[in-house]
Every structure is written in structure tokens, then in C-alpha cells.
Image (cartoon, helix red, strand yellow):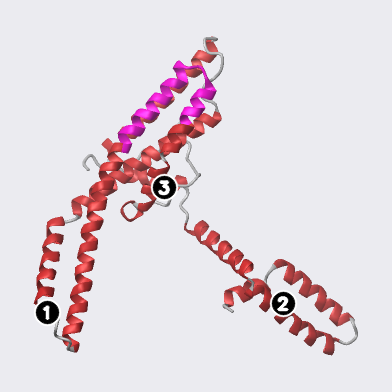
Amino acid sequence: MEPKYFKSAFLNHWNMLGLAGAAGFAVLSGFPEIALPILAAGELLCVALLGAHPKFRKFVDAQKAKEERQANRQTSADVLQHIVKSLPAPILAHFQKLQARCRELRQIANELKRSGDGAEFPLDNVQLESLDKLLWIFLRLLYTEYSLARFLERANVEQMRTDVKNVEARLAQVDPKDQSVHAQKMRRTLEDHLQTGRDRLENFAKAEANHELVQLEIDRLQTKISTLAELAVNRQEPDFIASQVDQVAGTMLDMEKTMNDLQFATGLAPLDEDVPDLIQAPVVQAKQRTTR
């Protein structure tokens, strides 16, 4: 049995309570020299059986994974500050313009309510949270697009292709009929080198495709958020607005997965339910570079 399961079984809350009670009973029994060894043997057997049980092992693994996620997890506030400090001013302004538009329309809706022209305040807390999530995805999309652009700019794809061709040429020079130790080592080394080069080219092609996709999603989501914010004012129907927000959020599931898969370029933690307040609270300003 792996030590971690044995340790978890022994330190289990209920096991420790039972062990303490049984030890106390053994001491008070008048025959501790007999009762304690029996207790120890029974404890070892119980711990071994519990630690070997598949369900208990799954429970221990799940708890361990949860602890690791919590230890490594970046808070949304940390991610927000990282993005704000990293993005050049023109890109950050692109987000702030959309953010200001949502705030402005929310203020108009609030004034309509106070003036009596609006029957209900169309942006309640639930809808604000949904719009916050869409703004949060939009900001992360901007950062993802920026990170991918930098990755593509740094990558020398022509050199990658040249390297692959050179390795292919060298591999072709190794006689396939030569079964000597030296020839076999050369072949394995060159084949591994060739596969690495092809993987780099494939990764570059995927990055290009994802960069184009992210750009399209930025334009689409910007239009969607603007439209939703306008609906909040023009249509005094909270249920309709909420359903539209949910519908747009649902279409972003694939994009969320794509962003999570692009951590190699962005370094961001996976997108979770912890969404910062982007409509009602201001984004902290940071000194930005003026060039990309």
C-alpha cells in the first residue's frame, strides 16, 4: 500500500477518535499489557483495509487534487492586475471603452427608473454578474490575442522549416540496412529530432489558427456585449435580458476551453467562476507601453 493512503487512513478523524477511545478503555481494563498489543494489531488491520479500499483511495486522491488546485490557483484579482499591468495602453483602452459603455447604459437605465419612465431596473444583480463574466472573458480574450501575437512574432517559422528539411536530409543519408549500434543510435536521434521539429511547426500552425479565432471572438463578443447593454435600456424586460445574457455566455463555453488550452502562451490560470466586479468597480490603472 502506498504510504499516502496508509497515512490518510491512520489520520482519519473517525479512526483517531476510535483509537483514542479504545486506548483509554485498554488502559482502564486492568490488563493493558494484553489489551494494547491486541488494539495495535487491530488498528494495523483496520488501517490496511481502509487504505486499500478503492473508494477511500479515490477520496484521498480527490482531496489531494483539491489542495493542489487551491495552492496553485490565482485569484481573479491577481489575474486582473497581471493583465492590466501587461497589456499595452491601446489594447487596454479597447476594453475600457466597452466597460465604460456598459456603465453608461446602466446609469441611463437607473435614471429611467428614478424618472418613472422605466417600470423596473433592468440590470439587477444577476444580470450584472452575467455581464461581468462576459466583460471578464472579453478582457482575457484581449490578453490571449496579445500573448499569441507576441508568440507568433518571436517564432521563426522559416528557420523551423529549414531545420526540419536539414534533419530529413541527414536521416535519408543513414543507410536503413545498416544495423550497427552506431547507425541505430544515429537513426533514433535524428528521428527524435525530426519529430520535435514537426511538433514545433504543428504548434505554430495551431497558434496561428487560434490567433485568428480569438480575433474573431473579440469582435463578436464586443458586439454582443454592446447589444446586451443597449437591450437593458431599450427593452424594459429583465427576464428577456437575462435570457439573452445566459445565451451569449453559453456560446462562450468552447472559447473558454480554447483559452484554457492556450495557457502555454498566456500563463493565465484556467477560467473559473471567480469573476471580478468590472462594471461597478473601476479597473486599477497602470502605466502602459504605447507600442505593442
- Image position of 33 (left or right of 166): right
Q: Is residue 131 visible?
A: no
Q: Is residue 117 visible?
A: yes
Callout 1 secondary element: loop
Q: Amino acid at mark 2?
A: Cys
Mark 3 lies on residue? 79
- Of discs 3 and 1, which sits in the foreground? 1
Q: Is residue 232 magenta?
A: yes
* Disc 2 and disc 3 in contact, CB within 8 angstroms: no
Label drawn at residue 174: 1
Mark 2 lies on residue? 46
The answer to which of marks 2 and 3 sits earlier in the sequence is 2
Residue 62 lies, in percent from the top left, at: 56, 62
- The magenta span reads 217-245
Is the N terminus in the top left, top right, bottom left or bottom right quadrant? bottom right
Callout 3 secondary element: helix
Up/down of 155 relative to 221, above or below: below
Residue found at the far front of this picture: 177
Callout 2 secondary element: helix
Residue found at the far right of this picture: 30
- The residue that appears at 90% across and 82% down in the rendered structure is 29
Residue 71 lies, in percent from the top left, at: 50, 59
